[in-house]
Image (cartoon, rainbow, N blue to C red):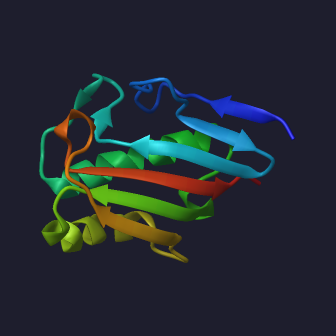
Amino acid sequence: MNKVTVSTKQAPAAIGPYSQAVKIGNLLFVSGQIPIDPATGSVIEGDIQAQTERCLLNLQAICEAAGSSLDHVVKTSVYVIDMNRFDKVNETYAQFFQKQPPARACVEVSCLPKNVLVEIEAVAVVK
């Protein structure tokens, strides 16, 4: 199987030595997305719900660039710096995964890149 890197200007560029996503076979592994606006390259303003939305919009753009979609996401990992905001993350997350939500892990971490509040990574199927 060929390993193919995926890149789109509709999501922020990687801020380190990694790819936005890697496709192998019919699986797409999307790197953790933080709430960076791809148009400005800056972390967006706002609370954890606004930041969760931007993370998911970035994931969506990468999935679409690879020929997939959020409907084909099978697993996500969500990293938050404060588990007390879990309900707010869920409110926004649920808007993006209304039917057949993927499997998910959510863990609290002490710090995330650029001091953001949330980071989300995903595995999707490419049809």
The residue positioned farthest toward the right in the image shown: 1
Q: Residue at x 48, y 61 (%)?
A: 76
Instruction: Say if 29 sits above or below 97 in the image.
Output: above
Residue 73 coordinates in the image, percent (x, y)? 58, 61
| Residue sitting nearer the eye, 44 or 107 | 107
Q: Residue 42: in sight, yes or no?
A: yes
Find residue 110 and report its horizontal and vertical position in percent: 20, 52
Quarter of the image with the N terminus in it: top right
In this view of the protein, can residue 66 be seen by the observer?
A: no
- Left or right of residue 72, residue 109 in this image: left
- Residue furthest to the bottom in view is 100
Which residue is depicted at the point 13% across and 39% down?
Answer: 45
Left/right of residue 1 with respect to residue 105 in the rendered view: right
> Going by the picture, which residue comes out furthest to the front?
110
Q: x and y percent of residue 66 in the render?
A: 66, 40
Quadrant containing the C terminus in the rendered view:
bottom right
Please name the residue shown 29% across and 41% down the image: 35
x, y percent for residue 46:
12, 46
| Vertical placement of residue 7 versus 58, above or below | above
Residue at 18 percent of width and 55 percent of height: 48
- Taking 7 as reference, is 89 above or below it? below
Looking at the image, residue 95 sits to the left or right of residue 64; the answer is left
